Structures are given as structure tokens and as C-alpha cells.
Image: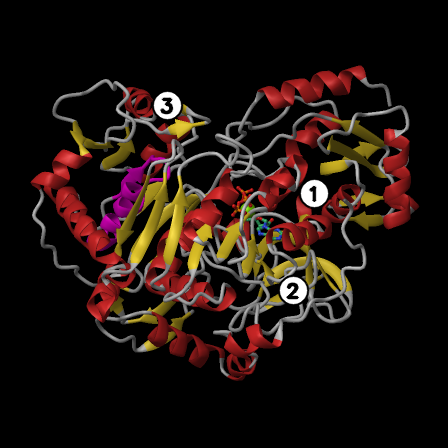
Amino acid sequence: MAEDQSHAPVPPSPEFAAAANAKADLYEAASADRLAFWAEQARENVEWADDFTEVLDWSDAPFAKWFVGGTLNVAANCVDRHVAAGNGDRVALHFEGEPGDSRSVTYAELEAEVKKAANALLALGVEKGDRVAIYVPMLVESVVAMLACARIGAPHSVVFGGFSADALHSRINDAEAKVVITCDGSYRRGKPTTLKPAVDAALDKGCPSVTNVLVIRRNGEDVAWTEGRDVWWHEALEAAEAEHTAEPVDAEHPLFILYTSGTTGKPKGILHTSGGYLVQTTWTTRSVFDLKPETDVYWCTADIGWVTGHSYVVYGPLSAGATQVIYEGTPDTPDKDRWWAVAEKFGVTILYTAPTAIRTCMKWGEEHPAKHDLSKLRVLGSVGENINPEAWSWYRRVIGGDRTPIVDTWWQTETGAQMIAPLPGVTALKAGSAQVPLPGIVADVVDDAGEPIEGETAGYLVLSEPWPSMLRGLWKDDQRYKDTYWARFPGKYFAGDGARRDADGDIWLLGRVDDVMNVSGHRLSTAEIESALVSHPDVAEAAVVGATDETTGQAVVAFVILRGGHEEGPDTVADLRAHVGREIGPIAKPRSIMVVAELPKTRSGKIMRRLLRDVAENREPGDVTTLTDSSVMDSIRAGASGSAD
Ligand code: ATP
Ligand code: MG
């Protein structure tokens, strides 16, 4: 069924607004004195061993120091402090395995595990400052592994478990990791999978820094074993001392390295540090999700291999004392209602997921969520890509029962935490807009010369002031850090995304500026044309790119996936072109539209438009190492060469 096309702003209900953690006065407080605002959030949201003496040192810009002089232990903030406050019996993690096994771990149990894991790492010779690579599925042990690294001040580099041995090899060597933490295997779509063989293959290619591999046992699959190097996680923890005192580290001590998803090119090794990162992830978890740790059950579906898994599975929610769900498997195993069965089973109240997942659920049909009681849900979140208004409205109606606010959160691996998002108790929500910078965040829309443009306008999205959870650089590459983010508009962080501001001052993300098209002198946004296509009842997903065109400069080329039950007919393409013409204007009508079965996506589910641009311009596709399934590109190219346009 087509959603309401009016998309009138949805104000918070009076009850929600009255009980909300974050109220409108935060905006005023932050704009009156931004640094005082962050100092207050720092002291309220994080426990410091030594208080900081200066909020921000920006003298060595673009290398920031936040909460100068402060010391803290990130893991103790995420675990020990809740036990000390008397909440040791609260469930920290409800784990749901794909085969249906589940396990609930309290904060007290989590504390005991993290201490032993910290001791196990120390016993392997990992010292403060040493790097640890983590290549695991979604398990309780994976969270424990990250926290154990944080506890001893050893920065982790989590590599998504779906990456190949080659990707793992280059990431291990880039970080010069001393230990690799992995797993025998996991379950995907009802079948056991293996991870350890990829680690073995990566190390066989030469990783001179690695001394040991710690192996979690999950599915009991046979694994090759290198004596002296490989150690079972459970044996190491059994042998480890139970007590461990968390030493505070400097606020600027490195917490982790994480590579971006590679949507636009070669992934970048983003460096995050301890204090500012924890302050902003904790504060946003409380404010943007309105998390009430005593009563909420929170579920973020992101894998810990992505920044969303770092900031909104591990650090933000645990630091805020949340009870949360983690799920090992795929959303359609054993059936397409699995997520909703999990949400019902644990009584999930806050759900955070990505537009790609929402559009997939739309494609599957609303009969699947309808089988389950989702009435406890009270806040929904979205991250990773533009959420088309059509998908937003479906999410709110079908999953949120037309009752829940949806927070569309714009942020990046580089920003560490949410930056532009509504506050659910304050903002009147607009479907498809991330809306306004959070209190304490200063974002602008600028023109080619970097000048802020006022009023209703479109341009480049920049962050004009430093923020606590900002990246501190690219691992071992200061120059690339400066060139990538600070060179285009001096003094401002350029995010790479285009944005439009509407008459109310709300921000609409337009996609990457590399993807913005120029058709006969008109700037057209991929995101807007995609949303127009997805608002057609036949279309489930769409990707739009600009291809060089002799007459118009660039021409709009669209790739669409039809919704379940819809077949391509003789009029489909003409209908869709006319629909875009009506929704946006004749100039936006795609020159050609290709109906495809799948779109090329990164392993975090984002559409890789640069590869489609290669197809549209008849080039060999560029770097495909972060693509989920390379056969998708072959079938699209076969289709493209067969179609005459
Ligand atoms: P790479 O930087 O390697 O090309 P990437 O940009 O996909 O990869 P991430 O850091 O995972 O890596 O993604 C951040 C980007 O995702 C943002 O710059 C933006 O383009 C997009 N994004 C994230 N959240 C939203 C949102 N709520 N609305 C629109 N776009 C979003
Ligand atoms: Mg990016």
C-alpha cells in the first residue's frame, strides 16, 4: 500500500515530550556557551578518574584535544560503574543466536568476563598502546573482547566478519596488530560458517606483528591450529585471574581504529580516542533515543564491524547502562519475521536500524511484522543512508504502530557519534529529513567558496566547529587526514555530503557530492530522484547516477528493484519516467531506467553508486573489495550491454 504522501510534520505527543530526557532548553544552553555545554555533558555522562582542566584545545587544528588533563577508563564506565551503583543484576546483553539459542548476561557477569579477558590479553603480552585486531560475528564474547581492549588501553581494530582474508590482511598490517581475536565460526541462514580460516590465510600472507590468535568457540567447526600461536579464548579466560583493576588513561588515549565502509573509494583508517568519544556517544544515546535504562530494552541491529556497532551497540548504550539485544544472524532465518520475533521475545522498546533493512522489509511485505506484538516499541531510529519519505512512513506505520517517533540520525565513522538528528521529545518530525544539528554541534550549508548560505538553499554540508567525538586523524596518515577533510574549505570539516536546507531550517541530506548530477546546468540530487522512484508503488529500491552525456553534460541513469509480486511490463519504464517528472519536474526524468534484481552494496548495506556510474559510462568497475557480492555487478553489466538506449 502506498504511504500518505503529504508527510506533514509529526510533533511529539504531550506525554512523550513531558517525560523526555532531552528538552528544548538544551539548544539554548549549547548555543549560549558550547564548551560549557560539553563540559556539563562530560561530567554528567562519564565518570572521570581525574577531572579535566580544559574543555577543548584546538591550537593544533585540525588535531583536537578534548577534556584536556582528564583521565578515565572507558570499559569501567561501560561496566564497573553500573555494578558499583547497585545495578549488577540488570541485564546488559540479551544474546539471540541464529539457531535460536539465547543467553542473558547481567552487568555483574559482564564485569567478571571483561576482567578475565583483560587479564588474558595481558598474559599474552598485550600492553597499553598495542593494537588488537578483532574479526568476529555478533556474540557476547565480541563485546567482551572490545571492552577488554579498552580496559587495558589497547586500541582495537574491528574488521567486519564478512570481509575476506585479503581485507583482513591489509587491515592487520596497517594497524600492526599484536593479537588477533577471532572465532571458529558462526551461523548464517541456518548453516555453520567459519571465520578462523580467513585469519589463517591472512597470517599466511605475512603479518609480522602478530604473536597470538585468540579463538572464541561458537559453532564447534573443525579449525586448523598453529601450536604456540593459537589460543582458545575459553581456556585463556579460565586460566586468567578474576581480579583486574582498571587503570585510567588520558582522555586522548586512542580507543580504536576503524575503516570506513568504502562507499566512495578505498576505506580510510579512522582514529578515535577515549574521553570525547565516550561523552558524545553516551549523551546522544540518552538524548536522541530517550533511553531510560531502568525500563527500556534497546536494540541496534548494526554489526560491531561498523561504527554504528561501536558507538550504539558497545560504547554508548553500555556506558548509559542500557539493557540491549544483540542478534547473531540474518533477518530472514528461519523466516522473514525473525527480527520481529526477536523484538517481541525481549520486549524491545527502542529499535535502531538502517534504511536498507527497512526497504528490504517493505519488499518482503507487512504480513511478517504483523505476526508479532511490537506494541512496546516507543522510539525508532535510522542511520547509514537517506531514508526515503516512503520508507520512513512505512517504518512508522508498520513497525511503530503510527505512534513512535523516528529519529533519522546523520553521522559518519569520522564523526564518531550522531550529529544531525531530531530530539524525539522536542522536534516535529519530517519524513526523510535528519533535521537539525544536535545541541553543541555546529553545521552549515556552504557554497563553492565555503561561505555559509542562508535561507532555503542547497550546497555542501560542513561542520564548522570541532565536536567531542570527532576523529583525531587517519591512522599514521596525518596528511591524508588534512587533505580529505580540511583542505576543501579551510577551517571547516567537509563531510563529503550535499545538503539542502528548507524554509524551516531543517536539513535534508542529498547524497555524496561526488554523486550530485549536473543536467543542463541544473544540480540534481541522487537522493531526491531515488525517493521519487521509491514513492512509486511498484518500486522497492532505486539507485540513481549521473552519466556523461554529450547534450546535457550529465544524464540521469536509474537502476530500480521492483517490489515483490511486481513484474516488469512493457510500460514500466515509461511509467516510472513520467512519475519522476510529476514528482520533481521534467528535468529530473531519467534518460534510462534499468530494472535489476539486486544493487551493488557495501557490506554495511549501502548502495555503491560509483560502480553503477562505471556501468552507465561503460567502464570497468573500480575497487570492488568492499562489495557484498561481486556477481551482482556481472549481472547488471550483462543487462546493461543488452539494453539499447
Ligand atoms: P567511505 O567514506 O569509505 O566512502 P561511507 O561514507 O559509506 O564510506 P560511513 O562512515 O559508514 O562510510 O558512512 C557515513 C555516510 O553515510 C555519510 O557521510 C552519509 O553519506 C551517509 N549517511 C549516514 N547517515 C545518514 C542519514 N541519516 N541520512 C543520509 N545519509 C546518511
Ligand atoms: Mg564517508
- The part of the image, by quadrant, that contains residue 618 is top right
Write down the residue under mark 1: 515
> For the N terminus, which image quadrant?
top right
Q: Please provide percent x and percent y for residue 528.
A: 76, 49
Q: Is residue 152 rendered magenta in the image?
A: yes
Closest to the observer: 198 or 290?
290
> What's the magenta region?
131-153
Q: Amino acid at mark 2?
A: Gln
Q: Residue 584, can we see it?
A: no
Task: Give the mark nearest the N terminus, 2 or 1.
Answer: 2
Residue name at image x 63 percent, y 60 percent: 434
Q: Which of label 3 and label 1 is nearer to you?
A: 3
Inter-mark Cα distance, 3 to 1: 39 Å
- Do residues under tags 3 and 1 come within 8 Å of each other at their CB atoms? no
Closest to the observer: 580 or 63?
580
- The part of the image, by quadrant, that contains residue 175 is top left
Q: Does residue 347 sit above or below 98 in this rendering?
A: below
What is the crowding at mark 2: few (fewer than 14 residues within 10 Å), some, or many (at least 20)? many
Q: Please provide percent x and percent y for residue 19.
A: 50, 76
Does mark 3 have its CB less than 8 Å from ligand 1? no
Write down the residue under mark 2: 435
Q: Amino acid at mark 1?
A: Asp
